[in-house]
Amino acid sequence: MHRIIVIDDQAMLRDSLRVAISLQQDMEVVATLSDAALALDAVEETSPDLVLMDVFTEGGHSGIVATREIKAAHPEVRVLVMTSLPEITFVRQVREAGADGFVYKDISATDLLAIIRSTMAGYSTFPSERTGDLSDSGLTQEEVRIVRLFCEAKSRREIAQELCLSEGTVKRRISEILAKTGYDSILHLAVDAISKGYIVPRLEE
């Protein structure tokens, strides 16, 4: 019997997952949480086999940070991270946190249950980063950071200071970003990136 913790800030989805998982003969839900900050304590109290972890949870706490904490303290516990947002760095961040898999919430319950079983069998499921106006443009990590900082309303000077670059270098990087993405201004790109979910400002990495 696979023991599972479900962590999601949406009560309806959390309850739906609990019901769907509990109907399986080889699975049981041992805890449900709305806040990823409580995840490590819950793991130590309930000894689950797998944690189904949302990226964003109650109180603005990061499921990616919680995943890193769980895997550091209990590497034997598998963590399957899920999200509904196409933020272009999620796949990389989730991998770096040590998660065993990553899924988007638009999959069916049948597919999710299959991925849970696959994860428990020792297989990793990671999608390729989603394509779109921004996510298939081949931006480097530094370029993504520049876009993210513009999304946070930072000036070119502030971006240069934060990234330890000259303002001239930032200006050149912006020109390269616009050439790759086809946008005519960094402001237009930032607005689209936020509205379409490709960039989540103030996301902890």
Image (cartoon, rainbow, N blue to C red):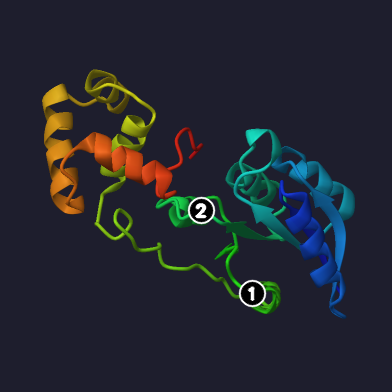
Q: Please say if 5 is above or below 120.
A: above
What type is the residue that disc 2 sits on? Leu
Residue name at image x 40 percent, y 63 percent: 130
Residue 164 located left or right of residue 203: left
Look at the image and tell me in which quarter the N terminus lies: bottom right
Tell me residue 27's x, y (percent). Answer: 84, 73
Residue name at image x 21 percent, y 26 percent: 165
For the residue labelled by badge 2, is the local secondary structure a helix, a strand or a loop? loop
Q: Please say if 97 is above or below 107.
A: above
Residue name at image x 50 percent, y 67 percent: 126
How packed mark 2 is, by other alpha carbons closer than 10 Å (few <14, some 14-19, many 20 or more), is some
Query: Contact (CB < 8 A) between labels 2 and 1?
Result: no
How packed mark 1 is, by other alpha carbons closer than 10 Å (few <14, some 14-19, many 20 or more), is few
Name the foreground residue: 4 vs 154.
154
Name the foreground residue: 66 vs 87.
87
Residue 48 located left or right of residue 91: right
Residue 69 located left or right of residue 4: left
Tell me residue 70's x, y (percent). Answer: 69, 48
Give the Cα separation between the discs numbered 2 and 1.
16 Å
Picture quarter containing residue 60? top right
Q: Please say if 151 is above or below 46.
A: above
What type is the residue that disc 1 sits on? Ser
Q: Which residue is mark 2?
A: 85
Q: Tally the marks.
A: 2
For the residue labelled by badge 1, is the local secondary structure a helix, a strand or a loop? loop
What label sits on residue 108 in the rendered view?
1
Name the foreground residue: 167 vs 41.
167
Tell me residue 106's x, y (percent). Answer: 58, 66
